[in-house]
Image (cartoon, coloured by chain):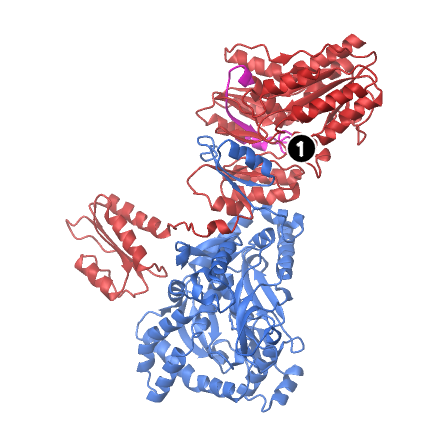
Chain colours: A red, B blue
Amino acid sequence: MSAPPPGAGARHVSLRSGVYADSVKLMQVSRDIGARDGVSAVLVAMATPLNLELAAGMGLAPDGEPSPDQLLIAIKAADEDVLAAAVTAVDAALAARERSTGTADAIPARTVAAGLDALPTDGSALAIVSVPGQYAVAEAADAIAAGRSVLVFSDGVPVEHEVALKRAAHDAGVLVMGPDCGTAIVSGVALGFANVVRPGAVGLVAASGTGAQQVSCLLDMAGVGVSHVLGVGGRDLSEAVGGLATLDALAALDADPATERVLLVSKPPAPSVAAAVEEAAGKLAVPVRSAALSPETPDLTAAVEALLADMGAAVPEWPARPGDGTTAAPGAVLKGLYSGGTLADEAMLLAAPVLGGIRSNTPLEPGLDLGTDLSATGHVVIDFGDDALTVGRAHPMIDPTLRLEALAGVAASGEPAVLLMDVVLGHGADADPAGSLVPALIAARETSATPLPVVIALVGTEGDPQGWSRQADALAAAGAAVFSSNAAATRHALDLLGAAR
Amino acid sequence: MSLGQLLSAPPAIVAAGVDVFSDALRAQGADVTDVDWRPPGFGDPADLAALALDPRRAVANRTAVERLMAAGSQLVDVRPAREVLGLPDRTLLHSGPPLTWDMASGPMRGALIGACLFEGWASTVEEAEKILAAGEITLDPCHHHRTVGPMAGVTSPSMWMWCLSDPVNGGRAFCNLNEGLGKVLRMGAYNEEVLTRLAWMRDVLGPILSRAVRDPIDAGADPLDVKAVLAQMLQMGDEGHNRNRAGSLMTLRELSPAIVEVDAPASDIAAVLKFIGGNEHFFLNLGMPTAKLAMDAARDVPGSSMVTVMSRNGTEFGIQTAGTGDRWFTGPANTPVGLFLGDYGPEDANPDIGDSAIMETYGVGGFTMAAAPAIVRFVGGSVPDALATTERMYQLTLAENPAMQVPILGFRGSPTGIDVLKVARTGWLPQINTGMAGRVAGTGQVGAGLVQPPQECFEKALAALAEESRAAA
């Protein structure tokens, strides 16, 4: 760079080696830089004798003996600031790459890295990964490496992979949602299993997929919308993961101007992690209310009602359809057949104080583990969405086969029962769950030797593709009692059992 | 934590896995790109995960790529291998991973025989075979001596070497002089024509080129920037491996004035100019050490899964990575597929041979097929194939080299820095453009075509990288 002669404004003359660009490209760059305010002369060109002559004519000759392989950058500007900006713009223009449109589509992206690389770098982007769990880590790591957040829907992701991914994401300033919690609504886009809910000011952080769906749907029914639903994975609040994504999601919502309140939804968390999260939440500017399930706080609907009270919003009468009045046979037991793990937990937490220990494939305490015997007698709640039951098949919210077989099994067993089920609507879920469930219910009630009351928690909204009322009416027509609140559905089932004792 | 713009604008979605989520997103009007995901082509899932999660990997690969891209290449000297490599008598360098006479293929044996005759270590073919078979001649890979050689790559002490220097990283790399096409030593031919040419190259070409390169530098001129020539070639229809026409002509243009100034008989000067002008691959032996300088600059970066060497000795294909030092990962070399000269056919072709795959390792050659539509028919492809090949290679590589641009792809930088993990995940192998040597010693070139490394090299490299990653954790 040469010193500016007095009174001539600012000058930049430099030579670079090892940079080659064709003359057309360089002429375009020169033209674009010359059009900037305050730039009076520009020559960006290979240092050929012809170009050096041009530069000398412009009073911008470089020092020394340039070689034609060198790139000459010569700019005259009104002041140093304009000059510096122009030099930076030259660098950007030389680095900018034109996007080819002719053939790029011919080779599909094989990895998330390739898919993200094809997107413009300046926009908002997110990866969603639902490949088999053992391979999910590489795809999710691609997103983090590209500085993008990722929703991992895959189940069967080893917990040590989850921890490593979430640590890397934290360092990269992005969020890993999931794994094994297929819910998120980000800036109005519903990802995985999520409902069509109105936009609003409540942000959800959810270590629970169906829990977040229950909460967001009830809020919607109360006229309250959500800003974002950030599903952090069913294990995030375990000792092993330590709330890594929950803490980052809370911080992100705290910084989000659209979020005025935060509700934290979770399966029963590890106590130490719950305490750490509570402490971190207390330091945020945005008020955070917990709807983490526990024996002391077993009811998601109650948590929503408390939040509505915080906001000064009225608690509506939660939509429901009465059943056909079928009463339970003497000695009836609770048979809970769930697709949502958090909804199953909520049902067990509410029922246990009334019925005693409830056996399950996802039990509240290890002594109640069913093992692989899903047809056990007594009070039983089964989560068909559990990893062990989704190996090699789709989630029960998509593929109801296994749950419908269990339904037929309960009816054929001869054990008197009250049937408690969830049906979850929304994006990603079965397009018409009642379509397969109604015939199965009718058949079960015909098969059953004793009256079989059916109680259904129908989680969804009117805006969902399946429509809450359409599904509720179809299920009610088959004799089921339908509730929009899983807690209300569970209590109704308990009432039926109580009346039978 | 603000998560970029994620919470302020609806995100574009890239989805890998089940269709149902993409369909639901499209129904909402979201911008969705589906990944054509499939299970990895090879590799233990635990190894793939260990590498994907290695916290060193991103930084290590960035470091390796930065060193590769920063590397320059200047032609600073031309000197005999004996002097510049310290190559002793009765030692021959060869292409590819380590090799013994017993396992050497026809063209490799032919070239080794020819070199023994050229050096005067044997006076007959039989004698040469005898001393080679008896282990009296030390064989060592070029790559172990900062050297690369096309095809058989056989380099003997009396051969003159291009000496290239990387002014950025301080590296040096070497390559012998290109003999031209047809019956040539590097293709395994060793008849009188070959030996006569080698003697002329030793006695006339080498000394004149040496003066033509050194005299201007001694007089204060800048050395020839070979990297800049390579960059320009890609904009002139060359891909830098199997098509070097523009590069060879540019080299002739750059060297001619100095060659003419050398104090030598006019007939020798004319012969040198005619030889260079008549050899469309003259530049290849300058392009290869240019790539070698860049790949050597990227060596020894713990945690990096970038390939630093791809090379073949006519029997085995070998690769090395930045994260595993100078360890070779080998597998049986494939035989190229392509077009044949004259009456030759596929049965005449030897398995893949030569260090010239350093060009693809550097991101040109087969990786920039799209830049050289004129060559695709020669190697048995079509123009859309060429474009698709380069597009595919972007998914195997870590970066785009802005110095090496492909005009037809909107001047996109070449796909650079092969990532072992990406090779495993995509199931796609690197694409190499190559010449084909006859499988019988003494035949010479039989054709040119396309070839890929055996997957086995990458399987072994992946396992070793994963093992190193776990040991480092």
B183 or A461: nearer the viewer: A461
Query: x and y percent of residue A423 in the render?
Result: 66, 23
Q: Which residues are magenta?
A: A219-248
Quarter placement of the C terminus of chain A: top right
Q: Does B148 lie within the magenta span?
A: no
Is residue A380 at all visible to an observer of this figure? Answer: no
x 59%, y 59%: residue: B324
Position of residue B406 in the picture relative to residue B328 (left or right): left
Is residue A430 at all visible to an observer of this figure? Answer: yes
Position of residue A17 in the picture relative to residue A42 (left or right): right
Q: Is residue A281 above or below residue B428?
A: above
- Which residue is most to the left? A7
B130 or B342: nearer the viewer: B342
- Which residue is identified by label 1? A395
Q: Is residue B272 above or below residue A242?
A: below
Kindly identify which chain the residue marked by label 1 belongs to.
A
Query: x and y percent of residue B368 in the render?
Result: 46, 61
Q: Is residue A96 above or below residue B172?
A: above
Position of residue A134 in the picture relative to residue B218 (left or right): right
Crowdedness near tag 1: few (<14), some (14–19) or many (≥20) residues, C-alpha within 10 Å: many
